[in-house]
Image (cartoon, rainbow, N blue to C red):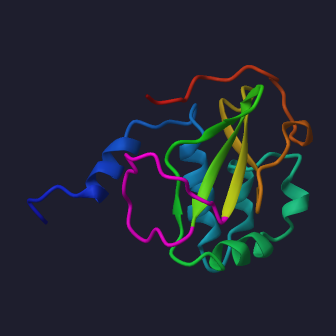
């Protein structure tokens, strides 16, 4: 155990208070599941929209997409979709092998995006898609359009 505090500790402290009413924690759960070998397809039903479950198939394509991102990391500040606060995007970044919290305004170019949607009937955010760009809110199954818990952090 180290007595020194570093950027990894800052990042861990930053996400310690996240819950299911914020998109980051379900996104992290999805990313942890997608790295398992073999994939446990049944567990994904806890974190993805039921409407998208069939489209994911056996999740092998999603797993291959994540594996293609060298030393991936996640953006810890989900972005709300324009005019759709019940849809959020989480960045999957390339070359981020260690947890850290970005404090400077720096343009980052995500390798992948997770699209999540607030589903009050489940009491949590669910992953709807993983891809090279965020999903359009009109293409996401939304049960509470325009309404979601505030997850922005100052």
Residue 109 % position (x, y): 62, 60
The main secondary structure of the magenta stretch is: loop
Residue in view at x 66 percent, y 72 percent: 66
Residue in view at x 72 percent, y 74 percent: 65
Q: Is residue 125 magenta?
A: no
Residue in view at x 36 percent, y 57 percent: 100
Q: Quadrant of the N terminus?
A: bottom left
Left or right: residue 128 compared with residue 39? right
In the figure, 4 relative to 67: above or below?
A: above
In the figure, 104 relative to 120: above or below?
A: below
Residue 132 % position (x, y): 76, 62
Left or right: residue 52 compared with residue 44? right
Q: Write down the quadrant of residue 34 in the picture.
A: bottom right
In the figure, 7 relative to 145: above or below?
A: below
Q: Is residue 98 magenta?
A: yes
Left or right: residue 54 compared with residue 38? right
- Magenta segment: 94-111
Residue 120 % position (x, y): 72, 26
Q: Quadrant of the C terminus?
A: top left
């Amino acid at each position: 155990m180290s007595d020194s505090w570093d950027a990894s500790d800052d990042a861990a402290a930053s996400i310690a208070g996240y819950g299911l009413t914020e998109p980051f924690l379900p996104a992290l759960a999805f990313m942890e599941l997608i790295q398992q070998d073999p994939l446990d397809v049944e567990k994904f039903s806890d974190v993805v929209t039921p409407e998208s479950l069939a489209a994911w198939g056996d999740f092998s394509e999603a797993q291959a997409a994540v594996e293609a991102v060298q030393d991936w990391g996640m953006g810890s500040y989900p972005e709300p979709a324009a005019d759709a606060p019940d849809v959020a995007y989480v960045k999957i970044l390339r070359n981020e092998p260690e947890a850290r919290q970005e404090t400077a305004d720096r343009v980052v170019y995500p390798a992948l995006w997770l699209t999540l949607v607030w589903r009050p009937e489940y009491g949590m955010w669910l992953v709807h898609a993983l891809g090279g760009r965020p999903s359009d809110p009109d293409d996401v199954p939304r049960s509470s359009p325009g309404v979601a818990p505030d997850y922005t952090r100052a």
